[in-house]
Image: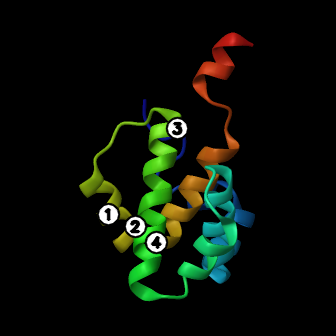
Amino acid sequence: MTWQHGLFGCFDNIGLCLIAYFVPCYQLGKNAEKVGDNCLLCGLSFLLPPANVVAQFIVRGKIREMKGIEGTVVEDLLIVFCCTCCALVQEAQELEEPSAAYVERS
């Protein structure tokens, strides 16, 4: 399975795009909360340069695992490091989409 929205599909949801650009710590916290991590700790980690990459990398990996999305650890690390805001939006959009298993049962 692949991501429902492309990495550069930031403008599919302009609200998410603006939040991820202007308040990325909030968006990372919300994404983390949806995968079962601590919203506050992940949000605050965004303010510490090495920790922000690690926290987002972990959250992205959990989203991929939860949704059954193909990819590698190296891809995740490069995307998080090079395209932070776009990755945040992509992850948030993915978390808003129902999972494929749920859609098939409906």
The residue at which mark 4 appears reads as: 84
Q: Amino acid at mark 2?
A: Val
Q: How is the image coloured?
A: rainbow
Give the spatial CA distance, label 3 vs label 1. Answer: 18 Å
Q: Residues within 10 Å of mark 2 (few under 14, many from 20)?
A: many
- Looking at the rendered structure, which numbered label has been put on residue 77? 1
Q: Position of residue 41 (x, y in %)?
A: 62, 74
Asked whether the residues under the numbered discs 3 and 1 touch, taking CB atoms below 8 Å apart as contact, a structural biologist would say no
The residue at which mark 3 appears reads as: 66
Sooner in the amino-acid sequence: mark 3 or mark 4: 3
Q: Residues within 10 Å of mark 3 (few under 14, many from 20)?
A: few
Give the spatial CA distance, label 2 vs label 4. Answer: 5 Å
Tag 4's secondary structure? helix
Asked whether the residues under the numbered discs 1 and 2 touch, taking CB atoms below 8 Å apart as contact, a structural biologist would say yes
- Looking at the rendered structure, which numbered label has been put on residue 89? none
Tag 3's secondary structure? helix
Asked whether the residues under the numbered discs 2 and 4 touch, taking CB atoms below 8 Å apart as contact, a structural biologist would say yes
Q: Amino acid at mark 4?
A: Thr
